[in-house]
Image (spheres, rainbow, N blue to C red):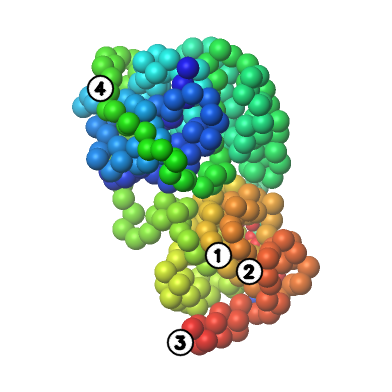
Amino acid sequence: MSVLVLVEVEEGRTSLVSREALTFARALGAGDVHAVVVGAASAATVADCRDAGVAVVHEAVDPALDRYAAAAWAAVVEAAGRAARADLVVAPGTGRGNEVLAHVAARRGLQMAANVVSVTSLAPLVVERQVVGGAALERATVSSRVRLLTMAGHAVEPSPAATPGEARVSPLAVPVDPRDMRAQVVRVERREKGDSAGLAGARVVVGAGRGAGGPDGFAAVDALAERLGGAVGVSRVVTSLGWRPHHEQVGQTGSRIAPDLYLACGISGSIQHWAGCASSRTIIAVNTDAEAPMVTKADYAVIGDMHEVLPAVLDELG
Ligand SMILES: Cc1cc2nc3c(=O)[nH]c(=O)nc-3n(C[C@H](O)[C@H](O)[C@H](O)COP(=O)(O)OP(=O)(O)OC[C@H]3O[C@@H](n4cnc5c(N)ncnc54)[C@H](O)[C@@H]3O)c2cc1C
């Protein structure tokens, strides 16, 4: 028996959340870890899989699969699952990972748990998973013969296996059923500047909320993010008011971040915002209100006006 991991690739590189899923799957100690990749597995992805202790990388190469189609990807995962004799399938809890495993669950009549943060028992499979946008944890039992789960982002940190895996690449022949292509991505448009993937993987995030005061209140926020080599993250109020683009939003309906440092300025720390930043290693709040939830939850806080504090920090950094 083995664990199969759906590995997502972004511009030829294994996504961070996929490397987290590989680490998570290995740590379960539930047999060999296999990976499945839709499209040709790049040398970088095979190397990542080897480092993560993967025994076999199943790759499904077919021009018809170049366009993302959840049902067709589900057929690939099913075929890889059979080839790997997997009784557990793990995917990153991304839009695609959740959608693909939901299709597998529906097609095969299997049980699936989404947004899992930990496994407390393998037989029966008992998981802890995030619900209500990460504001609460739920314990769930998954009892179908093949168990499906997606992982909450940043629940574990990717780490190499003590012994690298063979990472043998095994081609998977999966005839693409045209019915599985009825819903497919037909076009991808790139933003000219910035993206939420950069925010999700940033080591430093300088965040700003309504306290910024308006679209012109972000000069020091932008400057500090650039000075620290980080990204800008904002609250939903900021995006709803059109002060900043949606891809910068952190929270339940935005990006989940897990930086080493999150500097949250003029952000109250609502439960929906917290759902996206709770995995930050260190949080510093800058707020005029000493009772704001972000201040009470932060590791450190500066009680003051962000329009005075941030320029002072920039001055200090030189
Ligand atoms: C279904 C749903 C989903 C949601 N999803 C998200 C989400 O993904 N992300 C998200 O962020 N929100 C989300 N929200 C909105 C959320 O509930 C809050 O309304 C929002 O996070 C508040 O944004 P804020 O902290 O910027 O504003 P406020 O709550 O107005 O807080 C502003 C803070 O700035 C401080 N402040 C004011 N002036 C200054 C100054 N000059 N210097 C320093 N501090 C100052 C104030 O003391 C206050 O703490 C969601 C809500 C719902 C219902």
* Element type where label 2 sits in the image: strand
4 or 1: mark nearer the eye: 4
- Disc 4, ligand 1: is the CB inside 8 Å? no
* Element type where label 1 sits in the image: strand
Looking at the rendered structure, which numbered label has been put on residue 261?
Answer: 1
User: Does residue 64 show up?
Assistant: no
Give the residue type at disc 2: Ile
Q: Quadrant of the C terminus?
A: bottom left
Cα distance between the residues tagged 2 and 1 = 8 Å
First in residue order: circle 4 vs circle 1:
4
Q: Which residue is mark 3?
A: 318
Give the residue type at disc 1: Leu
Cα distance between the residues tagged 1 and 3 = 19 Å
Rendered view: 308 above or below 291: below
Cα distance between the residues tagged 4 and 3 = 54 Å
Q: Label 2: few (<14), some or many (≥20) within 10 Å?
A: some
Q: Are marks 2 and 1 in contact (CB under 8 Å)?
A: yes
The spot of residue 44 in percent (x, y) is 28, 43
- Disc 3, ligand 1: is the CB inside 8 Å? no
Ligand 1, what quadrant? bottom right
The spot of residue 82 in percent (x, y) is 40, 14
Q: Are marks 2 and 3 in contact (CB under 8 Å)?
A: no
User: Does residue 283 show up?
Assistant: yes
Q: Are marks 2 and 4 in contact (CB under 8 Å)?
A: no
Question: In the figure, is residue 78 to the left or right of 239?
Answer: left
